[in-house]
Image (tube, rainbow, N blue to C red):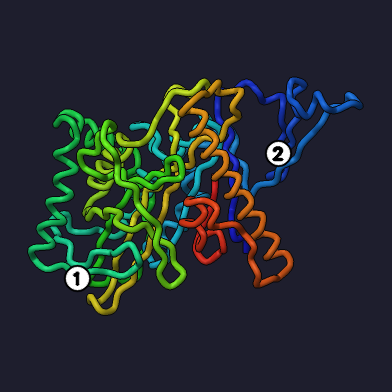
Amino acid sequence: DETLNVYLRIKGRVPFGDLYTIEDNVLSCIVPASSQAAKLNRQNRIIIKKFSFSKIFGPHTTQDELFDVTVREKVLDFINGANGSLLTYGVSGAGKTYTMIGTPGDPGIIPRALNYIFRTVCINPNSRPCCKPMPNGKIEILSRSKQEVELQVRQGIFKDQSTSAELLKHERTFLSMQNTLKVTPVGVVDFFPPIFEVWVSFVEIYNENIFDLLEVNSNRGQQRTKLQIGTSHRNTYIKGVKHIFVTTGLEAYQILQFGLHNISYASTNLNMHSSRAHCIFSIKLVSGNNCEEYNVSNFNFCDLAGSERMKKTLNEGDRAKESSKINTSLSVLGRCIRSVREMQKNNSDICSAPFRDSKLTQLLQQALQGKENICMI
């Protein structure tokens, strides 16, 4: 089995169809004459580069087709207790956020996953939290007073969204998405344990610092709290990150939108609204017969910051520093993937992958080593 499935999605309405061909999930690209590689080619021959993928999705692929092939089975595995991660990767403006979030009439992967999860597990929307997942993988049994605190934390996020009109807008958007998705199939689970709770968290890795996007009243003019990485039984986690209890897809979507509002965006020459951070929206599922016999599964939706060349972005100052940090962490990710693949090819138990060279790869280490479900688009 492949440890890491890598899918290619080709953006629609881009006039470069004459520069590539696709055959058997191999993309063959003609290197543009204006590129550095072509200029250094002294033989003046056409240069063709070939790239192999687990599957290639053409420009007319629908959001539903993409979700069905890449994520649906992994989300069902998550409901049944397995961990998983999905990464979207590409240059600024390539369509990563559209793929992940989508539009009201064309929902992306996260809204589809939320719809799939909550239509499959059917949680009582009036239920109270009783087992809170801790960042280190354990749980905390909540007293009545602590249950109330968790409900107030969630309510605080809803109240902090600038206006009731904004909250209503998110509600209408998600309901429109649900209306689009109401005919999609749901998963079949043989057994639902007495405890079945969903918690969400949302962080960004900005300039190699980790910030909680669900921090209420996080003002751009104020110093934000930097979160640290911890380890427990060889598992890496983020210390002090907030987990919010949700009982419906709508609540989870509203919290997602709250976090998106806090992301570090900036204008670059490639994209007017380019995210300058890696963003990780995580869903945790606590399930079990009682608070002594439980399982905590986790699914990460990781929207990687846009990779881009400095001269194309015309970045200076802070933008240049951001681009440097982004490109460095993406380079480390690539080196880790190559190291793991070499280890597998050689049937070796020794992994020399530089996971500790970036926060992103530290957090994804278990998945990149093949110990969890993972795929990249």
Which labelled disc corresponds to residue 141?
A: 1
Tell which tag, 2 or 1, sits nearer the viewer.
Answer: 1
Q: Quadrant of the N terminus?
A: bottom right
- Viewer can see residue 178: no
Q: Is residue 121 above or below residue 302?
A: below
Residue at 59% in and 23% down: 312
Residue at 65% across, 47% down: 53
Q: Is residue 77 left or right of residue 159?
A: right
Would residue 296 appear left or right of 16 to someone viewing this image?
A: left
Q: Is residue 120 above or below residue 25?
A: below
Q: Is residue 133 above or below residue 5?
A: below
Q: Earlier in the sequence, mark 2 or mark 1?
A: 2
- Is 111 or 318 nearer to us in this picture? 318
Could you tell me residue 230's position as x and y percent? Answer: 39, 62
* Amino acid type shown at disc 1: Ile
Mark 2 = which residue?
27
- Find numbered disc 2 in the image and state the secondary structure of the residue it sits on: strand
Residue 198 image point, x, y percent: 27, 58
- Check disc 2 and give the amino acid type: Leu
Residue at screen point 13% across, 61% down: 147
Of all residues, the one furthest to the left in this rendering is: 145
